[in-house]
Image: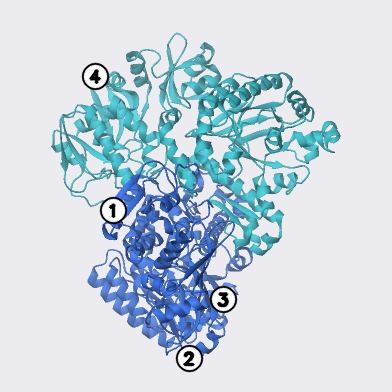
Chain colours: A cyan, B blue
Amino acid sequence: MFELIRRDGLARLGKLETRHGTLSTPALLPVVNPNRPTIPPREMRERFRVDAVITNAYILRRGEWKEKALSDGVHRVLDFDGIVMTDSGAFQSHVYGGVEVSNREIVEFQRDIRSDIGTVLDLFSEPHHTRDRAEADVNETLKRTEEAAAVKGDMLLAGAVQGSLFPEVRERSAAGLSPLAVDVSAIGGVVPLLEAYRFLDLVRVIIAAKKGLTPARPVHLFGAGHPIVFALAALLGCDLFDSASYAKYAADGRLLFADGTRHVEELHELPCECPTCSSTTADDMRKSETLRAEHNLHACLGEMRRVRAAIAHGDLWELAERRCRAHPALLDALRELRHHVEFLERTEPVSRHTAVFFTGPETAHRPAAWRFRERLKTRYRPQAETAVYFEECARPFSRNLPISPRRLWRRANAVCLVKSVWGPVPVELDEMYPIAQSVVPRDLDAETREAIEVFFQQFVRGSGIREGFLWEGAATLDRLPGPPRTEEEDVARVRAVMGMQFGLDAAEALLAGKVTVETSPRTHKIRVVRVDGEHVASMRAHDGLFTLRAAGAKRLHAGLPKPRWRVTVHADSAEFNRKGANVFAKFVIDADPELRPLDECLVVDPEDTLVAVGQAATNREEMLAYQSGIAVSVREGMS
Amino acid sequence: MFELIRRDGLARLGKLETRHGTLSTPALLPVVNPNRPTIPPREMRERFRVDAVITNAYILRRGEWKEKALSDGVHRVLDFDGIVMTDSGAFQSHVYGGVEVSNREIVEFQRDIRSDIGTVLDLFSEPHHTRDRAEADVNETLKRTEEAAAVKGDMLLAGAVQGSLFPEVRERSAAGLSPLAVDVSAIGGVVPLLEAYRFLDLVRVIIAAKKGLTPARPVHLFGAGHPIVFALAALLGCDLFDSASYAKYAADGRLLFADGTRHVEELHELPCECPTCSSTTADDMRKSETLRAEHNLHACLGEMRRVRAAIAHGDLWELAERRCRAHPALLDALRELRHHVEFLERTEPVSRHTAVFFTGPETAHRPAAWRFRERLKTRYRPQAETAVYFEECARPFSRNLPISPRRLWRRANAVCLVKSVWGPVPVELDEMYPIAQSVVPRDLDAETREAIEVFFQQFVRGSGIREGFLWEGAATLDRLPGPPRTEEEDVARVRAVMGMQFGLDAAEALLAGKVTVETSPRTHKIRVVRVDGEHVASMRAHDGLFTLRAAGAKRLHAGLPKPRWRVTVHADSAEFNRKGANVFAKFVIDADPELRPLDECLVVDPEDTLVAVGQAATNREEMLAYQSGIAVSVREGMS
C-alpha cells in the first residue's frame, strides 16, 4: 500500500508498506551483489541508514546461494534486516542477450526466498528496437506480469513499463500495467539512455509512462543510480531508484556527485563534505575501492535527502532546474518540459509556502506560470478597456520607483498591467501566488524577455482591451505596505483573485450581496471577506489565495452545479466529515476534474448535500486511484 | 610570501607561508569568538582539518583575555596550533559606530599576542556613504596602513580596500594599498552587501579592487562566509574568506548550504551528506546549536574544497555559473561579468584539459569565448571570399548528419563557418580549444541564439568575405575521425591555428619554407609540424594548440621583434634556463603584455638572446609582481 504524504510537481513524499517496514519515498535502493558486496548490507543499514536494498534473484538462483536463500531467506543471505527487493534477470538479458530461467520460475523463486518486493521477468526494450518489436515485447511483458501476479503470494510485485523510445507504446504499456495486480510500477529499459547521457529521451520516456500509470503506486526508475538525475526524475514522478552505480563507478575509480563525476586520479583533494571525504584524503581514495564506494553511496543518499527536503519545502522545481545545468544534455531535457506543461499542470499544487526563484529562461514555462497565464485568459475580466502597462517585470530588489502600478490604478480608469515572467500581471493580482512570492533578476535573458512580450500580446488580443499605453519609466509590482487602499480597490481585488482561483461564475456566486473587506491594520492586506455580514472567505498571508469558510462553501455549493468544486464521498464517510474529520481517498466516489492539489473544495455526499469544506490533497484522478491517505483536509464540517 | 600553484579565471590555488605553517588557498578561516566558541578551535583542527582561524583582537584586548593573550600568545588562548589571523575591530566600528582603540595600539597588540596575520584598523565604508566620505576614509585607511606596516614586526599584515560602491574609489584604494608593506590585501565593507543579497554590487566592488591590487598577494574577502558566494568570489580572485556565519546562522536555527539556507524548523530530514547530517536527525539538529554549527562548518569547508578542485580541474566557470542559479540576485551578479570580460580575459588561461560545458546564456560571454571571437577578427584571415555557413551550432550528440563542414570545405572553394556559441567557427579551427572541447545543448535559448547571430554578423562584416550562402540542413562540427585529410587541408589548418595562437605574422615566421605535417594514423589529427625538415611545433591532443619546439622558437625569435612572445630574465637565471630549468618569477625583468597564462613563450636574456622555450604560468603583470613561484615552465633549453 502506497500513501501520498506530500507533493511537488509530479514528485511525491510517500510511504510504501512492506513486510520489513515502511519505506519513505523517494528512495534509493543500493544494489547488493551477493558475490561482491563492496559495502556489506549490514553496514548500509547501520552506518548509512539505508532502509531498503535490491539484489538480483537471478544471480542468487544460479549460484552457490540458491539452497541457503531458499532455506534461510534472502534477508539472512544478505545479512540485512530491512526491506529487500529483488530483480528478475531482465537486466542480465539486456547485458548478455538472454537468461536461462522462465518468468514463472524466477517469480516463484523470489517469493520462496521471501523477497519483500519481487520483479516480473520483463522483456528489456532497447532504444534501437523497432516499434513492432517494442509492441510485441510489451504484450509479452504484460502477459508475464499477469502470470507473475497469480503466483506471487503475499510478496509485493513490481511490473515494468517498456516500449523503447515510442511514447505511444510506453503509454500503452503503462496503461496495460495499471489494472494488473502489481504493487510497484517500474520504468525499464532506461539504462542505455542514462549511460549515453540521453536525458531528453529519458524525460520523454518517463512522461509517456506516467501518462498511462495509475498514481496509486510508486514508480521505480530501474537502474537510475547517478545522483545527477535524481531531482529531475523525482520531479517527473519517479519514487524509487536503484543503483549499482555507487559500486561500479567506485570500481572504475570514479566518484559520483550531484553535479557530475570526477575520476579519482584527477583529484588533489576531495570536493565533498561526506563522512568519507571529511576524514580521508585523495590519496587514500585512490587506493581504496571501498572508500570510493562509501563516498558514492553517501553522495547518492545525500542527494536523495535533498530531493525529499525540496519536495517537503515545495521548491523541487528550483533544485531540478539547477541540477540540469550540470550537463548540457540535462539542460536539453529540462527544456523539453515546456512541451508537456499541460500534463504537468494537472498535478501541480496551486500554492506553496516558499519564495519562487527564477533560475533561467526555463522558469517562465513551469506549470505554475503556465496555469497563471491560462487562467488569466478564462478567469480574469479586465474592468476597463484601456490598459496602462509597464515594461519592467517584477523587481523585488528595487524599492525606489517613480510610480507604482497600484497608485496609478487608483488614479486612472485603466487596467494596470505589469509584464512579468509569469505573464502580464493585473495589479489586482499582485499579491497572489506565484506573483507575490517571486524573486526575479533585474537583468533578464533575451528568451525570457521575448516570452514576456509574447505572453503579453496573447493576453491583450484575447482580453477585450482596446487601447493600451506604455508607462515610461521604471515600475514594479508594488508590494510594500504603501498607503491604505480604498474599499473599492479591495473589493475589486477580492473579485479578481476569487475569479482566478475559482472561476468567474464562482466569484459571482461567492460575492452576490454587500461585500465588506477587513484588512490588516499593519500591512493593509486583505484578511476577511464578508458578504451580507457573513464570513465567506479569508485571504491567506502566505499565498494571497482564499480559504473558504462555511458561508462561502454554501454559496459556492448553491451557485454552481455538480461536479464543480465538489468531492463526492460515500455516505459512511460523509457522517464523519460533517463532524470535521478528513476525507480519506478510499471513500471518494467522484470529484471535479478541475480540482488541483491544494485547491479549496466542497465535500458532498452522494445526494450532493454539502457536508464539509476543506483543501484537496490531490486531483480527481489521484483521489480515485489512491487506496490510502487523505484526499481532503477538512477545515469545517457542516454539522 | 604567496605563491601561485594553479589558476582558473582569476581564481588561484596558492600557498601562503606563515609562522604556523603554509595555508593552501582559497581557504576559509572560521571566526572564533573567544567568549563563545561554538566549536572549540582544537576540534576544528582535529575533526574539521581547519588550518587557519580568525579571531578578534579587539575583543581579546578589552576583555578578561588581555593579560593571558599577552603572556601566552593568541594560539594558547584559543588552544589552536594552526594559523591564527586577527581582526582589528573595524567590523565592530561598523556594528557599534566606533571603537575605543587606536590603529597603532591594536596593531601592536596583535603583534604582541603573536598573531600570524594581523589587520590594520581600517575605516569601514558603508554602502550609503557619499563619494567624499568614501575617499576621505580611504585616505585615512592608507595612512593607518603605513603606520601599521611600520610597527608590525614580523607579523604578516592585512591591509584593506575600502571605497563603498564607487568603483574608481575602490580601484584607487587598491592601487594605494599595493605598494605598501602588507602581506594580504583585504576587501572590506562588503558584509552589508552580502546581508542584503546585493551580489551585483559585490561583483563590481571585487572587480574594481582587483584592478588596483598587486597580483602578488592573497586577497581576503572580509566577512564572506556563506558558501553560496564562494565559487563566484573565488572566480573573481578572492583567496581568503572568513566566516562567523557558520556560528551565527546556527544560533538563529539556520543551516547553510552551497545553494542556499534552510531553517531547521522547516526540515523533516537533513538534506546533506556531511558527517553531522549523516549521523543525526532533524530533531537533534533542532535541539542543538552545536550540531547546527558543525553542519554549517562542514558545508562551508566542503564547498571550499569543491572550489579548489574546480580550479585544479579548470572548470570553475561551470561551478560558479551553476551556483549563481541558487538565487536570482546571484544570477544578476553572473550576468554582470560580461561587462568586465576584457579585464577577465587578461588572466584567463589559453587552454584547459577538460570538457567545456554550456550552462546557460551566460556561457557565450566567458572570457575564453570572447577571446576566441576577438582573435578571429585580428588573427584569422579567410582563404576565400565566399563563405558557406551552417545555422546549427556544435552538437556533440548528433552523429547522423547529412553533411559535415569539413567535407564541404574539401569540395568547395569557400570558407566553411559554423555558427556556434563561441562565435563563428571556421572549420580549420574546429579542433582547437575551446571549440573541440565544448558540449552544448541541442535546443539553445533565444539569448544565445541571438548572440550567435550577432557574433556571426560582426565577423562577416570585418572579415573580407563578400558572398555567403546558408547550407540548408543539419550540420555539426565534425569531430569524428572521418576519412584521411589531404596534405593541403592539414597545412591550412596548421596555418590557421598558429595564426589564432600566435598571430598572423608569427604564423608566417613559423611556417616560412616547405611545410610537412605528420598526422596520427588512427585519428588523422595533426601531431608534428616540420618546416624544411625541422620539427617546429607539435599539436597537443587535448586542446588542439601548438607546443613550440626549439626550431619553432628560433623562427619566432628571429621573425618577431622584442617583446613579442618573450619573457626576459636576468642573466643569472638565463644560464640555468638554458639548461632546461624553469624560470622563477623573481628573475623576470619583462615580458610580452600579450602573453596569457599557459601561452607558449620564448625565454630570453637581457640581450634578447634566446635561451629557452616553455609555457608561461602567468601574464606579464603577474610575472613582474610575484616574488615566488614559477613564471615559465621551460620545455627546452637552447644550450
Q: Position of residue A451 (x, y in %)?
A: 31, 39
Q: Residue at x 40, y 14 (%)?
A: A563
Q: CA distance from mark 4 to mark 3?
A: 78 Å
- Using the rendered image of the protein, determine whether residue A281 is visible from the camera's viewpoint: no
Label 3: element kind: strand
Q: In front of the other: label 4 or label 3? A: 3
Q: Residue at x 78, y 41 (%)?
A: A79
Q: Residue at x 47, y 21 (%)?
A: A620
Q: CA distance from mark 2 to mark 1?
A: 49 Å
Q: Badge 3 is on which residue?
A: B22
The one of B636 and B147 positioned closer to us in this rendering: B636
Quadrant of image for the C terminus of chain A: top left
Q: Are marks 3 and 1 on the same chain?
A: yes
Q: Is residue B83 above or below residue A380?
A: below
* Label 3 neighbour load within 10 Å: few <14, some 14-19, many 20+: some
Q: In front of the other: label 2 or label 1? A: 1
Q: Badge 1 is on which residue?
A: B457
Q: Amino acid at mark 2?
A: Ala
Q: Chain of mark 1?
A: B
Q: Position of residue B246 (x, y in %)?
A: 50, 59
Label 2: element kind: helix
Q: Badge 2 is on which residue?
A: B571
Q: Give residue B99's mark.
A: none
Q: Which comes before the other along the chain, label 2 or label 1?
A: 1
> Answer yes or no: do the residues labelled 2 and 1 have beta carbons within 8 Å?
no
Q: Amino acid at mark 4?
A: Gly
Q: Relative to B214, is A144 on the left or the right?
A: right
